[in-house]
Amino acid sequence: RSMQFSRRAIPIRNASVVSKIHQTYRICYIKDVILQKGLDEATLASLNAIINANYAFVVCLLKDDTSFMQRLFATMRSSNISAESKRELVLFLREFCTVSSSLQPAQRMQLSRDLAGRGVFDIISDVLRSQEKVLVSAGTDILHYLTQDPNLLRSYIANHEESSREGISLLGLLIEGIATDFGGEMLCQFLEILKVLLDGCTADTVTQCRDFIELFYEKCFDKLINIIESSRVEEYSAKLEILYNICELLCFCARHHPYKIKITFFGSNSMEKILTLTRRRERSLVVAAVRIMRTIIGAGRNDELLISHVIEFNTLKPIIEVFVENGNRYNMLHSTVLELLDFIRKENLKSLVLYVVESFWDQLLMFEQLASIQAFKLKYQEYVDIAEETQTTSVDHTRKADERGLDKEEEDYFSKDSNEEDSAAQTRHAHQQCLVKPANGSEIHHIPARPKSGGLVDNGSDKDYKPSPKRPVKADEA
């Protein structure tokens, strides 16, 4: 009968809301404590439906109560309240967001926009700076709920990046959160929030999403890489869970932003720093590093510049070395490296196939009995045979072309001589066929161009011929 079980972080003046809260509390107590083992599925479903309906009723009334929402956020911003009171208000806001999951999607989106408009992100930024894990956990839960509309958070971060208090923006706090050992589910919460912000770009939000991605790679990417690099020194090494979550985030970035990853890797030796994890004793971290390399190659398999970078800097060397060190032990590392080699072979990445075999075949020879390694070597031999065949064919074509060129020259030469002879014969014939016309215009028979040596009458030898003496001409005839 006493209502001392309910603590009020802030007074609720609506009696209907208070009544529903008390009723819901009693139903939850009956379901979870009194009848925990004696409820059938139908009764349990009915009780859950009543609880969700009550939650929706309470949230709808409170979010539409302008006076209540103003008092809530004004009190949370106030610097005059005690740490305990502020803590209770933050926990209340988390509970408020949690029970809002019973609303319809459109109502949840609208509630997120209403909370963002009232300045909830400023409050969360202060909460995440707290040293109290309970408050930080509550802040991440609230922030995770608000990522139902990630563009709200992207816009806030982009607009407040330069004016953040103490030089740490909300994005910087998220990066610090993923690199801090809070334990429990908090690391996963930070990771999920960053994934949502880095993904989910649509045609309507492409500008805000692009701006946030640029900001992330400019301000935060190197910090994540440096955390991995510092893990080589034991005293500065981050915990296993932190490094694993960072690797998970880098894999996510490689899948969704291959172009940005390529530019980032070309600008620094980021891939080499990531592959320092292959020297760790924890096999899960070694596998995570190999998965990053596999994801990068998979996303950029059509990018010759990226493939050339991998070959030029001998990036696969640490992976092959740790694979050889693992020996014949069949574990996740063994399977992950073989999957990487299978992917290179199946995708016909010729440059990488040649690079792996020509650089590391002496080391891989001990695994020659494995089907994956045999197939990889066959693919290499196929490329070599094709190259030799292409070269031989090219030489044959060149030789045949030269021979055809020589035959053509000979044909042209003899054809030219024949044409000259025909031309000369035609010229002689033309001279012999000249026509002579007398003065009267009548034609006569053809006369040879060169006269015969004899006279008109053949009188034998020319030397026996004696012309008759000329008769003297008389004066009267003259």
Image: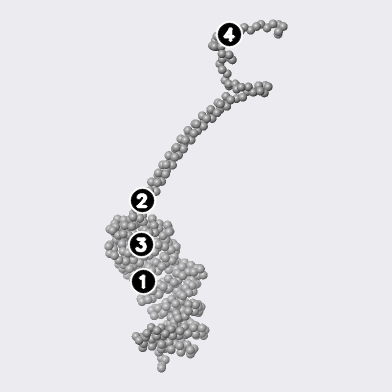
Crowd around label 2: few <14 · some 14–19 · many ≥20 (10 Å)? few
Q: Nearer the viewer, residue 374 or 209?
A: 374
Q: CA distance from mark 4 to mark 2?
A: 98 Å
Earlier sequence position, callout 4 versus callout 1:
1
Amino acid at the residue labelled 3: Leu
| Residue 263 image point, x, y percent | 44, 62
Instruction: Report the disc number at residue 466.
Output: 4
Label 1 sits on a secondary structure element that is helix
Q: Which residue is mark 2?
A: 385
Earlier sequence position, callout 4 versus callout 2:
2
Label 1 with label 3: CB-CB less than 8 Å: no
Amino acid at the residue labelled 4: Lys
Q: CA distance from mark 2 to mark 1?
A: 48 Å
Q: Which residue is mark 1?
A: 242
Q: Quadrant of the N terminus?
A: bottom left
Instruction: Report the disc number at residue 340.
Output: 3
Is residue 362 something that shows in the picture?
yes
Label 4 sits on a secondary structure element that is loop
Q: CA distance from mark 4 to mark 1?
A: 140 Å
Q: Nearer the viewer, residue 348 or 270?
A: 348
Q: Nearer the viewer, mark 4 or mark 3?
A: 4
Crowd around label 4: few <14 · some 14–19 · many ≥20 (10 Å)? few
Q: Is residue 138 above or below residue 472?
A: below
Amino acid at the residue labelled 2: Asp
